[in-house]
Every structure is written in structure tokens, then in C-alpha cells.
Image (spheres, helix red, strand yellow):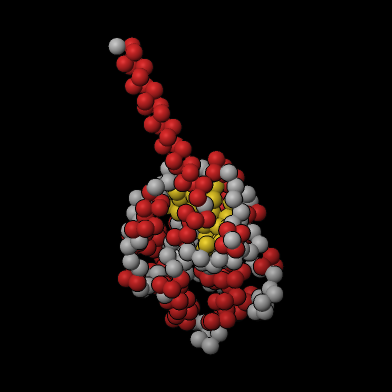
Amino acid sequence: MEYEKQYQHVPATKYECLLFDVDDTLYSLSSGLSKACTKNIEEFMVQKLGIEENKVTEINRVLYRNYGTSMAGLKAIGYNFDNDEYHSFVHGRLPYDNLKPDPVLRSLLLSLPIRKVIFSNGDKVHVAKVLKKLGLEGCFETVISFETLNPTDGSSTSESDDEISLKFRGLSTTSDLDASNCLETPVICKPFENAFEQAFKIANINPQKTIFFDDSIRNIQTGKEIGLHTVLVGTSHRTNGADYALESIHNIKEALPELWELAADKKSEGVMYSKKVAIQTSVMA
């Protein structure tokens, strides 16, 4: 009974699209990719940006918390670097072999006659590699990645080290830092509303008729604020802004059985329509 109470059912007819994050959503956090990604980001900060090694962990934590991605935060405080170089360094060395084909998830996705769209902050090469490793190629109608929302390099004139240092000193490293007081980033990404708005426009999505799956509480909360039905993945505990909470994406059918009821209804309608046409043809003959 407690398991059922963590879900808040709504009529399936409301749903026209399923919107999915990728990392730690379509696969488990236990894969180790997230940990490896954090390590790569911190190495990039030291090796490519010259940030002191004993400071990168805290700086990365603060920037990620307030900007959704470390890249967005680094750009906000003045660091200028090539986006492709960053993604190659950070994602190019990930242990993708830790990901295995997921025929169960593939079957679940393909059994639903509802639009399915990817919405990731990751670059297109990374997203493609993950989907291929999971065996989920062809399951999604559209893929919205970093390049989709940031089609140009977005580079700007480099600032001096003193200017960058001064900007960062203006950011508190305490847990109660208010993101609304942070510097603006040129990177468009979740959890900011402009990223969602662009994604809706690009993929022709009606948020009121869309279910959004993500492992980030901040992304989920923004999604809820702008009208999406939301599913927090990676925990069974619902938080503010989450309509549903799934320990694993594999629990989708248990949490949202109405999606499969809708699929069955559509199939039945198709069969009835086919029979009706056949009968009419017979009579006319």
C-alpha cells in the first residue's frame, strides 16, 4: 500500500509525449559514469583552466548546484573555452562499457504508442553513445542535446585571471547560496526555464500533456513550475515538484499503468475500425 501512495495518478488521456533525461535516468547511478564525469570535469578545470587542484571540488560543487552544469557555471564566471574540447575531455573518457543493453527498457518504450523525446544537457556524441550502449536506438522521435539548444560555439572575449578571480570571490560557497544572485551564463541548459521553453518549441511539445523524467530535483521542480507532469527517477521518495518517484526507470509500468491502458485502448480502436471497414466492404460487394 505504501508503494502505491508514492504515486499520484492522472488520466492517461492527458499524455501525448514522454520527455526523458539521459544520464542517471535511463541508466542507474551505479554505472559509475556520473562519478567518472565529475573526476574528468575537475581534471579539466586543473589542466585546461589552471584552477588550483585543492579548490576544484568545492568550486565544481557550487557551480553545478547553481547552474545545472559545471560548464554553464564556468562560462558564467568568465572562463572561455571551446565547447567541443570540453565535451571531448569530459565525456570522451567515460567508461561507456559499463553500460549494457537494456532489452526490458527498450520493450517498455516501444510498447507505448506515445511520442518519446530525449532532453539532455549532454552533447550529441555522448547522448548517441549512451543510447547505443543501452540498445535504445530508434526508441525516441527527437533528441534535444547541448548542441540543439546551443547551436553555435558561444565563445566570447577571454577575461583576465584577475577578473575571473574577482567574479568567483563574489560567489558564496555555502549551501544557502541563492542561485538567483549568480552571474548570467551564456549556456542554455536545464534547470533554467529558457531551456525548457526552447525544447518545447523545437519538439512541438505541449507541457500540460507531457510527462518529464529526470534524476535532478531542480530540473523536476522547474518542469513542474512550467506545467509538466513530473517523474523523479532514482528514488522512491517523492519530493516537492515531483508527481511520481521511481527507484528505477524500469518501474515506469508499475507507476504509470494507465499509459499501457491507453495503448490497449488505441489498439482496440484500431481493430474495431478495421473490422468495421471489412464488414462494410463485404456488404457493398
* Residue furthest out toward the bottom: 54
Residue 226: image location, x then y, percent: 63, 51
Examine the rendered structure and indicate whether residue 101 appears above or below residue 31.
above
State which quarter of the image contains the C terminus.
top left
For residue 170, side relative to residue 195 (left or right): right
Examine the rendered structure and indicate whether residue 88 appears above or below residue 114.
below
Residue 40: image location, x then y, percent: 43, 77
The residue depicted at 51 percent of the width and 65 percent of the height is 247
Residue 190 appears in the figure: no
Nearer-the-camera pick, 228 or 1: 1
* Residue furthest out toward the front: 1
Examine the rendered structure and indicate whether residue 222 appears above or below residue 40.
above
Q: Quadrant of residue 94?
A: bottom left
Examine the rendered structure and indicate whether residue 209 appears above or below residue 4.
above
* Residue furthest out toward the top: 284
State which quarter of the image contains the N terminus.
bottom right
Nearer-the-camera pick, 84 or 214: 214
Q: How many marks?
A: 0
The residue depicted at 33 percent of the width and 58 percent of the height is 103
Residue 52: image location, x then y, percent: 52, 85
The residue depicted at 45 percent of the width and 76 percent of the height is 35
Residue 255 appears in the figure: yes
The residue depicted at 41 percent of the width and 51 percent of the height is 109
Residue 179: image location, x then y, percent: 66, 68
